[in-house]
Image: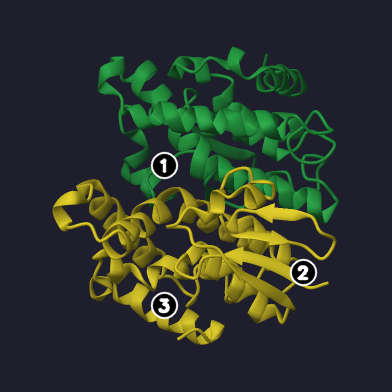
Chain colours: A yellow, B green
Amino acid sequence: MPLTLYGDPISGNCLKVRWVAERLGLAYDWIDVNVVKGEAKAAALLSLNPAGQVPIVVLEDGRALAQSNAIMLHLAEGSDLIAQDAYQRARMYEWMFWEQYTHEPAIAVRRFHKHYLGKSEDEIDPALMVKGRAALARMELGLAGETPWLAGDALSLADVALVAYTRVAHEGGFDLADYPAVEAWVRRVEAALRIA
Amino acid sequence: MPLTLYGDPISGNCLKVRWVAERLGLAYDWIDVNVVKGEAKAAALLSLNPAGQVPIVVLEDGRALAQSNAIMLHLAEGSDLIAQDAYQRARMYEWMFWEQYTHEPAIAVRRFHKHYLGKSEDEIDPALMVKGRAALARMELGLAGETPWLAGDALSLADVALVAYTRVAHEGGFDLADYPAVEAWVRRVEAALRIA
């Protein structure tokens, strides 16, 4: 039995999981869940993830798992998307937790309000732009280092986690031209994942 | 050279890292950083963590690492705080990412506004109570399972991550008496970590 991935294709959190499955050559069925219509909170999905969110994966043995970054860590275990070196792996974790705590709640949320809910600039909490720009500036600094990837010397789950919403940040009103190292890195990760 | 932990003792995110170091019997120096006074954004600490947040650990070899849950995963690698079983470990990751995305931004933030900034109930975003109660309800459901711990059959980093702010949720105006399984679990985790 292949994996079953439940996700909304407008959600970077869902796409990241799909990209990892593709990259690893895993067999999976994809089931569309429309988040805007509230389908993630339908009873059948709540039984898989009481938090009422997608992505959800149902594994080969029928057990479910939620949280995009947790699913990626599970699927990619033992692969080259997770560094063998303990410190590089720890830095990958650092970026992944930072992504969910700091980056996603600003950049993905502003995109959702602007691009999917169609709010005008006036209707969007001004703090989201400030926080999103600070997050992009922090990535710009992180990409000024010695390697072309966020954590360690190869593409890792940190890059996958962070590219998901960074590559569509313009839909949230952010201009990546202000962050040239980030913009170049987005193209690099897209090429590596073949999602350009 | 021992570990150096930079943290604010009022921050659950900082305390979790300290509890793991204690539990594992690691030698460490603790350096107080006053978050309310903005000390985490001082130049010396920004050079260790450009995100301007604590906790930060400086490892034995002088390299720095940030993000509480990433630090815990690094310090506890190979210990009994991380399950050997891949699915139990993945569920631990799921709870840890959920903690940072959903639990902390409601429960820790409301506590900070109420208890440390001294805001009145009227001055606090009403969404924080709604979101915090939903998070506690989700934990109550998660603790109705077959084991007394959040992920798998033993204490894990999921319990450490989530107990940090759950045990002081009353300081944010939440009443754990409404969540009896959560309340019993808090006592259990406190006893296991000897922080009661």
**Do the residues at discs 2 and 3 belong to one chain?**
yes
Q: Residue at x 42, y 78 (%)?
A: A185
Residue A163 rendering spot, x and y as whole percentages: 46, 70
Which of A185/A54 is in front? A54
Question: Which chain contains the residue that carries disc 3?
Answer: A
Mark seen at residue A186: 3
Q: Is residue A192 visible from the viewing direction of this image?
A: yes
- Element under disc 1: loop
Crowdedness near tag 3: few (<14), some (14–19) or many (≥20) residues, C-alpha within 10 Å: many
Q: Residue A4's quadrant in the figure?
A: bottom right
Q: From the image, state whether disc 2 or disc 1 is nearer to you.
A: 2
Residue A90 rendering spot, x and y as whole percentages: 62, 56
Q: Is residue B64 visible from the viewing direction of this image?
A: no
Q: Residue at x 53, y 87 (%)?
A: A194
- How far is mark 2 from mark 3, CA to CA? 25 Å
Residue hosting label 1: B53
Q: Which amino acid does the dot numbered 3 rest on?
A: Val
